Image: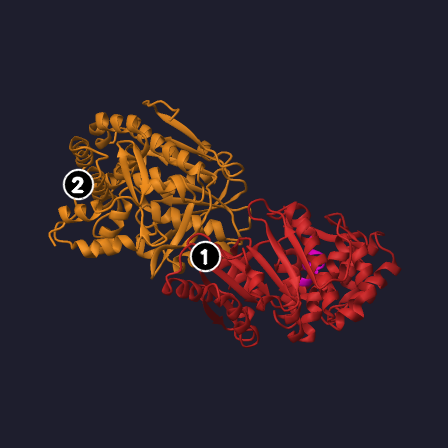
Chain colours: A orange, B red
């Protein structure tokens, strides 16, 4: 990490991807400022895609900021992961075509991860690709979906099975909108933030540890740094490895465990970030059994996760065998062997197949059956 | 053009697009040969996507060629442009997911342009992009869809409105399959072939002129050269200009006129190639009125198009005003002015807004009202 940790009222981060490079701007009150959009929208015509929860809070402000210089329409989708489908996507195409939007039009995605994914995929596929600007309204979306270019929808047989890589022309991460975020969702976003520290940025983890009270109070200057440093970490990983594999797999620390928990508990029961938090503690346990982390380090990790109001363990009543089999269905199974992302040290994750019986021992520890 | 014209039993053409470069192989009996697929399919799992018309003729042969070394499934779609929809696309996703296909799977598109477009877009969007191999079974698909990476589906409000740029890992253009092509479809493919001569390759046009009898007899050696030279022309244009605009617009010679004819006659009434053929004659007429072509050159163009069993004029009973307004809806309207692709000379097309009254004069010549 070349960037120092700092408190500030605004941060600009360039994601370097050749001709698809773009800026992430992080500040309070950003999405209402006309200037924030300068240079990110190439033509007059803009479609804001948002949802029923976010629209009453922020759509008017965004619309006003853009209307001085653009011709703006707003499409409000129902809120929820269950609407991240081809059918909902088709309603975006309908609106674009009914309005006669051409290839120079821009989609502005105002909402959390679901809106970013579906509006981003609409932009990726409308007339084979138009521009889009992301206005992420959850902490998770600000620290995760802001970087990486993943867009898409779910299929009844699997999540995120249909999609494209499509980079935004700009991301405006407005820390002001986090004020309205429910506590549980804020905490869920923090799981991914802590993850960046655990996999590759020990100084950031220490800074988080020291600033958790201010973070939990959602103090803007501290949140700006949380988001900037998280996005910088993700951008470094993604720039080295735009289309997955290799280093990018490290971003899945806790996710193989977590996905299995989400699937077994039923999607929506636990938030993704909550499952990832418990999964990271389980991954720490597996690493401890391999002698990579010691007891004290595991407790340190659990303490930070707990202080962020996140679970440090899954529900005890689940079954080892079910979780093990759900983990084996994860995308990180290459050539028949489940690969795990584990920490060799705090701030240093690796992808490995050499975990022997440690995974089973971890599952036995956490589950009664 | 650096490549000489020749008669041969096999041609290989490399489409240079950096890491997305691929080969177009052109020969007879190709799709039944296991070797033809070597290096184009990275993993075991293959889904052949074809249609009800093509499947009985060629699916078994392709399946057999691949089955020795791959795990092959076949999905047969209904035949026709009216099935190029999101709903049909979803049936491809269904099959991929029901079979548990991962990111290493490959789609083999066996059919004409519709199959190439929809199967290609399925490949572009399944798990954010998997490989695909194109086995085009019409002359039009072999000379047009083989190069350029355009994939997609129609929307009720517009053709090809949803899609992606996605390059195949290989194209096998098998001239043997052209034997089963109806005469009208073969001729429609020739419209695009003649177009390459008209826009940028006068020697090719002269060669076509001299070989039209052999081409109409579908002699394999001559067809191989027809396809190779057409693809080489398109590849040169596309390599310079992968994502449209600039030079690539030249590929639309006759298309602005032709799209208006198709729309006014009702899609499917005239084949696309037939409308383009008449459109190219109309474009020649407009160029003549600007003093760019002379009477003799226009007659020469009409004679070649006619010898390829294609129409040299649209139905006379259409209305100028209707056609003019449909042309104005074309994608090539930039900043409010309709741009036309016209020939400054045979073999040298340009995009221009400076056609004054010549377009209206052309419409008056061809239409009664």
- Residue B67: x and y in percent read 48, 67
Q: Which quadrant holds residue A254? A: top left
Label 1, on which residue?
A: B43
Question: Magenta span: helix, strand or loop, mainly?
Answer: helix
Comparing A298 with B41, the one in front is B41
Where disc 2 sits, the SS reads: loop
Relative to A229, does residue A85 appear above or below in the rendering?
A: below
Relative to A317, does residue B227 appear above or below in the rendering?
A: below
Relative to B275, does residue A193 appear above or below in the rendering?
A: above
Whether residue B234 can be seen here:
yes
Q: Which chain carries label 2?
A: A
Where disc 1 sits, the SS reads: loop
Residue range of the region highlighted in magenta in the rendering: B251-259
Relative to A115, does residue A176 appear above or below in the rendering?
A: above
- Magenta stretch holds residue B172: no
Label 2, on which residue?
A: A312
- Residue B112: x and y in percent read 59, 67
Q: Residue furthest left?
A: A368
Mark 2 or mark 1, which is nearer to you?
1
- Which quarter shows the C terminus of chain B? bottom right
Q: Mark 1 lies on which chain?
A: B
- Residue A23: x and y in percent read 45, 33
């Amino acid at each position: 990490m070349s960037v120092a940790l700092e408190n500030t009222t605004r941060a600009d981060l360039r994601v370097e991807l050749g001709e698809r490079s773009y800026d992430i701007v992080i500040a309070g009150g950003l999405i209402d400022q006309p200037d924030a959009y300068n240079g990110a929208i190439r033509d007059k015509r803009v479609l804001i895609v948002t949802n029923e929860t976010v629209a009453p809070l922020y759509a008017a402000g965004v619309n006003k900021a853009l209307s001085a210089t653009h011709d703006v329409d707003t499409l409000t989708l129902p809120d929820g992961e269950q609407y991240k489908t081809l059918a909902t996507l088709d309603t975006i195409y309908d609106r674009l075509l009914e309005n006669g939007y051409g290839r120079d039009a821009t989609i502005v995605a105002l909402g959390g991860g679901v809106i970013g994914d579906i509006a981003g995929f609409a932009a990726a596929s409308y007339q084979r690709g138009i521009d889009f600007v992301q206005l992420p309204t959850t902490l998770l979306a600000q620290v995760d979906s802001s970087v990486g270019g993943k867009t898409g929808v779910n299929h009844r047989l699997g999540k995120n099975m249909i999609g494209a890589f499509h980079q935004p022309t700009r991301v405006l991460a407005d820390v002001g909108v986090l004020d309205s975020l429910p506590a549980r969702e804020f905490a869920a976003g923090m799981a991914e933030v802590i993850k960046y520290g655990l996999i590759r940025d020990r100084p950031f983890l220490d800074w988080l540890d020291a600033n958790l009270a201010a973070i939990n109070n959602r103090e803007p200057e501290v949140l700006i740094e949380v988001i900037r440093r998280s996005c910088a970490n993700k951008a470094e990983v993604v720039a080295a490895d735009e289309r997955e594999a290799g280093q990018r797999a490290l971003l899945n620390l806790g996710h193989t465990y977590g996905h299995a928990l989400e699937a077994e508990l039923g999607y929506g029961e636990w938030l993704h970030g909550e499952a990832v938090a418990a999964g990271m503690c389980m991954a720490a346990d597996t690493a401890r059994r391999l002698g990579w982390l010691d007891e004290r380090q595991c407790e340190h990790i659990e303490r930070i996760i707990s202080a962020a109001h996140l679970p440090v363990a899954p529900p005890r009543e689940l079954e080892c065998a079910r979780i093990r089999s759900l983990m084996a269905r994860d995308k990180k199974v290459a050539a028949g062997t489940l690969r795990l992302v584990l920490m060799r040290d705090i701030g240093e994750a690796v992808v490995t197949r050499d975990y022997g019986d440690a995974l089973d021992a971890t599952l036995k520890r956490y589950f009664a059956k």
